[in-house]
Amino acid sequence: MTTRIYLGADIRPLEHGWTLLVTEPGRHQTPSDVHRPAARIPASVPGTVAGALTDAGLFDPAAPSPLHDKDIWYFRSLEGEASGPAVLRFEGLATLAEIYINGNLMLTSDSMFESHDLSVDLTGDDDLAICFRALQPRLDAKGPRARWRPQMMDHQGLRLVRTSLLGRMPGWCPSIHPTGPYRPILLIRPGRDTIGELHIQTDFDEAGTGLLSVRLQAEPGRSVVLRCAGVAAELEAGSDGAINASMRLPGIEPWWPRTHGNPTLHELDLILDGQVHPLGLVGFRRIDIDRGDDGKSFGLRVNGTPVFCRGAVWTNADILRLPGSAEAYAPWLMKAAEANMNMIRIGGTMTYESREFFSLCDQLGLLIWQDLMFANYDYPFADADFAAQAQSEAETLLAQLQGHPSLAVISGGSEVFQQGAMLGLPQKSWNGDFFNSTLAEIAKTGRPDCAYVPNSPFGGAMPFAPNAGVTHYYGVGAYQQPLEDARRAEVRFAAECLAFAHVPQQATLDQHLPVPPVHDPRWKARVPRDRSASWDFEDIRDHYLQDLYGVDPARLRREDPARYLDFSRAVTAEVISETYGEWRREGSTCKGALVWTLQDLEAGPGWGVIDATGEPKPVWYGLKRAFRPVQVILTNEGTNGLAIHLVNDTQATVEATLDLACLRNGRQPSARGRAAVTLKPHSVETLPATDVFGAFFDTTYAFRFGPPSHDVTVASLLSTDGTMLSEAFHFPLGRREALHRPQFEHRLEQREGVWCLDIRSDTLAQSIHVDCEDYRSDDDWFHLAPGVWKTVRLIARGTPGAAPRGSLRSLGGHNSYGFS
């Protein structure tokens, strides 16, 4: 565990000059046993063995070969480095590692999640070697008897080793074993200033004052000044060098999640004897747990304001290389922000991400739910050594993440409670002190400004019960419940939900999976499934395709595979949009829900809402619309009629006009009304459709007085200048009855350097797709009411070149309409 901070030090990453050698386990005991010319495969650090072998043409990520049954040696010469004292910092080694200097064993590590500082005295002619020992013998070794054995992982011995479960979950992700120096190796030449035990805590009180507390160890007698947001305070170190200081910053601009305000950050500096040392950016915000009126809920209040948390579960930026750089994270997190997400969960089956991840989330206004990496297994916490290692892991993580306002929730792990409970074991066997007390105390000490939950899920009569605490909700989804179950289940907070085999855009399939869909083995290999289940998540998608559109999926894919794929793309966006509308309405019990997952780990119909190439899938656009901070939602209340819910998450009052139209045959108004509305900041309110019409109209076709009068209701929320803020669609007869064949008009022109495509339809058009090879539209797979011009911005995928050329098509039409 690294506890020293070398201020003003010369820090250089040892990125290049590495070679590696793969051998059978145990062949070489020390570096001197290795025939050095054999180690000729170049490797980058940080990086993985799989990545280096792929670059050398010796590993196929699409058909990965095992790596956990081999020893891998890394070598690098330190010849030419200046002689003298230095520190080698190893920020992450996966997983059983031995570090040698000049052939001498200097350090061993048996956790992927530990960081190590190794003090060395360099001569200028030194040699560094790391051996990553085969993990298989450790996995096969016997340990304490487990009370349950989860089926989703490929080896039960993983419960005994601190390593990621990525690459070890058949049906969930590619079997690419995480091995190698996946985090930086740094050569540090300490300067004069070194501090230790740094602890930064921020808070934001009800009076609008920022509270800053800092604790650190420094040399006695030094002049120490702390400066934040232009305010400086001189500190005094005791005789032991300990400094404890607090600052009050009245009127400080707080940090908000992006949907509810500005994610404001402030520079924090430590000044030692006049020398300024930046400690990074900090944010001031307050997190409180919202238990609801009945005490059974779980939600977040940020700065005293309830926040509906929406987003997705993170998997990894690149499972082949496990990168931790801002450059690797940024494309994914920026798309999360673009989709109006305000929370990302790092699940317990993944791996810890670097500080760069949290820094980006700080800047983007994305809350982070951080699971500790304990998932599903019956871990041997009764073993003193294992428990001590687990505690150190949690303490180190939270020490590294001080001051980051994005970190909001810390969870002791994922589905440990659920796994034991679902197997019928008594509560005392899975709901133990390590999660409820030990880790809770570590979280309270390390990040008292964050919410802590002992496990995800937890809180109900059973951990997975959706009507209390935190759940993993798959009623709508894997359990094939009707859409109404999202309300009936009384979901309080879904830390994961709504998993489907989301079909990517056709261009991704053409380039990365050019095979017949569904039954080709190469296609099926990329469809997620629960191990040993007789169904997969494509079956789940087909269930809702039939339910929402009334078509036979098997027949459709035989007779018209392209149309089947379009229906498949549209249906998951529709299911998720409907479900989030239910959860965000006034009166909903739900205070947050995170989709499983943000991104795919390989190209194909995976869980991710963004495909493995970084291209948003159709469902991503549905989420982007469903997550809008200013939103109109329609819900069917049966004989109570159609309810209109108006949401304003922002800090500003919104003056708008609500337009409501019931359309026959997708075009002729049967009823129409308009009302001026004022949406207060951070508010949700509801009004019945009859208030807009001024009279009774059977909007939901609940009374069935004669033939239906309309097949779609469109609600449009317009700003005072006529800009469309949000719109919602309700289909009283189902979506199939409202599938019309539209005729499109379009205009394509540049405005302020951006290509804009204006589209108008003569009738309701469902799930319009904008297909443009060199550009991505900022909205796609959207519904369009008749006679209304909609503008989509076209974003160049690379350097802008020629004017866009592409086509439009809708789910109801059978023809494409070209534009240029």
Image (spheres, grey):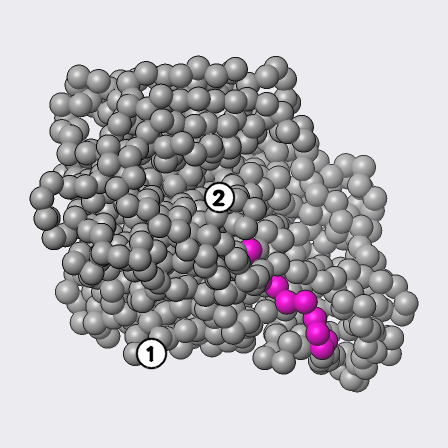
Q: Position of residue 394 (x, y in %)?
A: 49, 65
The residue singled out by tag 2 in the image is 724
Query: In the rendered image, which quarter is residue 224 located in?
Result: bottom right
| Residue 254 colored in magenta in the image | yes
Examine the rendering and report whether any part of residue 467 can be seen. Answer: yes
Query: Any magenta on residue 544?
Result: no
Residue 560 image position (x, y, % from top left): 21, 18
Q: Main secondary structure of the magenta part?
A: loop
The tag on residue 111 is none
User: Which residue type carries mark 1?
Assistant: Asp
Q: Could you give the CA–CA distance between mark 1 and mark 2, rounded to whole angstroms? A: 35 Å
Q: Nearer the viewer, mark 1 or mark 2?
A: 2
What residue lies at 63% left-to-right and 72% top-to-bottom? Answer: 202
Foreground pick, 469 / 224:
469
Q: Secondary structure at mark 2?
A: strand
Amino acid type, residue under disc 2 in the picture: Met
In x, y percent, where is residue 546?
16, 35
**Looking at the image, is mark 1 or mark 2 earlier in the sequence?**
1
Pick the front one: 331 or 373:
331
Query: Measured along the vertical axis of the image, is residue 738 above or below residue 649?
Result: above
Q: Badge 2 local density, few (<14 within 10 Å), some, or many (20+)? A: some
What span is colored magenta in the figure? Answer: 249-258
Decide if residue 322 is in sight here. no
Q: Is residue 409 left or right of residue 334?
A: left
Q: Which residue is mark 1?
A: 293
